[in-house]
Amino acid sequence: MIVLLNTLTNLLSSEPYVTVISLDFSKAFDTVRHSSLLHELAHLDLPYHIYNWLSDFFYNHSHCTLFYDQQSSLIDITASIVQGSTIGPAAYVVTAGDLAAAVCF
């Protein structure tokens, strides 16, 4: 952020305006469905033990919420990549890699 602010400040000293385009992919990893990811991974030339490890990584995760003394029932997690996991960016790229651009007029 400091580098960006410094660059913008320097550019604004010599230019009338500066256009900044910023993309935030932090929520993109929440769109990765485990079944879609594993389907795409099955088509890649991965060693079986790597595919099986990834399959086990995404299998049988659940979530519940505890609020005061009340706990919700467990719900299976079928999408999303754990924030901070190093597999997140690669999983998103594999899943989104076959998307086609849509042109709307």
Image (cartoon, grey):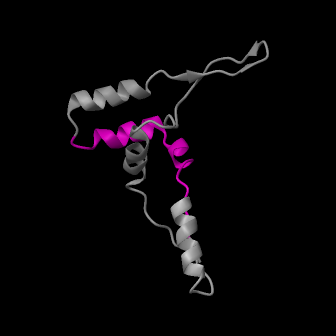
Left or right of 96 in this view: 44: left
Quadrant (top left/top right/bottom left/bottom right) for the C terminus? bottom right
Toward which corner of the image does residue 97 lie, by quadrant? bottom left
Quadrant (top left/top right/bottom left/bottom right) for the N terminus? bottom right
Left or right of 82 in this view: 72: right
Magenta span of residues: 21-45
Q: Is residue 4 visible?
A: yes
Position in image of residue 90 (x %, y %): 37, 45
Of the pair 61 and 69, the residue shown nearer to us: 69
Q: Residue at x 55, y 68 (%)?
A: 6
Q: Residue at x 55, y 42 (%)?
A: 30
Q: Residue at x 57, y 73 (%)?
A: 8
Left or right of 94 in this view: 79: right
Whether residue 26 appears in magenta in the rendering, the answer is yes
Whether residue 69 appears in magenta in the rendering, the answer is no
Position in image of residue 16 (x %, y %): 62, 87
Q: Is residue 104 visible?
A: no
Of the pair 36 and 57, the residue shown nearer to us: 57
Rendered position, 39 above or below 73 = below
Toward which corner of the image does residue 72 lie, by quadrant? top right
Of the pair 64 and 33, the residue shown nearer to us: 64
